Amino acid sequence: MSREIKHGTTGITLDLERDTARLVALVEDAAIARGAAVSALMFHLAAIRSLHTLKPHGEHAAVMCVAARVQDRQGGDGYQAAHLVPGAIKVNGLDVWDLITPTSGQMLKLQLQTKEAFAETRVLPAAANRADSQAEGDGSPNSAIRLKTLFGSQVQLMWKSQRFVASRPLTVDRDGVLHALSGWFAGLNRAYESAAVLKRQAAALAGDANARERRTLEASVLETYAQSFKIVNVARFVQKEIGAVYRRYDWL
């Protein structure tokens, strides 16, 4: 069950950042929302992949996760809008939604939903968003165990391994999508744990008490992400959280 916390004055924001139980509740809800958003997007990306069975955007295309440029809302008063998906996907240097030619209502819907998915955010206390940025990394090959790198690698895996039938566009290889999502969820906790360790180290090296307190809080947020969201059965999670998307596409 999602817990809604009203955003109020600066005083309320500061209280929230010091109220561990309420912060944990927000972080847990954000983790579930991120899991659902990434899962839905992976199915949309698989549908886009089904439109490209040959070069240059077929199985050997270069897939990268880069920083997102657009968000669907702004924060304020001590809160920040945190993207649910860790970054935008480019295929051979193109925004992935530009691989869709909107020649029908169905294609236009897929294009718009994909754009919206990359812009979707959750408004969180600033401490949670700063912690999230630590976990995301910059997406470079050297950012080991970071969310951008992890997400990009799993999309690349799905893109390369998807089965398809050229005469059946928008038909999705469900097993391939679930396999990619399993890799995402398996690496997710390690990414948060690694980021929490780095944040604890930064807190220990902080030169003043305020910085130390801020980084310690951010480390706690990362540890909460790591401990509170572990998916055992990916297919069951997907059916429960994004049932409409799961049922939308035809399967191979």
Image (spheres, grey):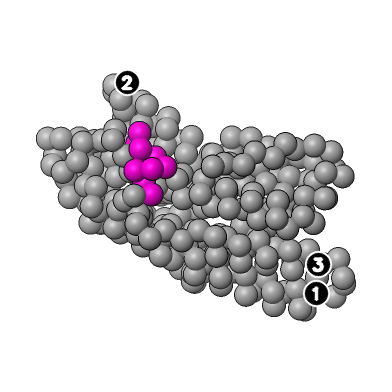
Q: Which amino acid does label 1 sit on?
A: Ala
Side (left or right) of 249 relative to 63: left
Looking at the rendered image, the quarter that the N terminus falls into is top right
Question: Which residue lies at the image location 62% right of the left edge and 70% below the top edge?
Answer: 196
Disc 1 to disc 3, C-alpha distance: 9 Å
Q: Do the residues labelled 2 and 3 touch (CB within 8 Å)?
A: no
How far, Cα to Cα, is label 2 from label 1?
54 Å
In percent of width and height, residue 129 lies at: 66, 53
For disc 2, the marked residue is 105
In magenta, the rendered stretch is 237-245
- Mark 1, secondary structure of its residue: loop
**Nearer-N-terminus badge (2/3):** 2
Q: Can residue 92 be seen in this view?
A: no
Mark 3 closeness class: few <14, some 14–19, many ≥20 residues within 10 Å: some
Mark 2 residue element = helix
Is 115 placed above or below 130 here? above
Residue at 23% across, 42% down: 172
Q: Which residue is drawn at 54% across and 39% down?
A: 120
User: Residue visible at 82% across and 50% down?
Assistant: 15
Quadrant location of the C terminus?
top left
User: How crowded is the residue under tag 1: few (<14 C-alpha within 10 Å), some, or many (20+)?
Assistant: some
| Labelled disc at residue 213 | 3
Q: Residues within 10 Å of mark 2 (few under 14, many from 20)?
A: few
In the rendered view, would you say 212 is above or below 245? below
The residue pinned by badge 1 equals: 206
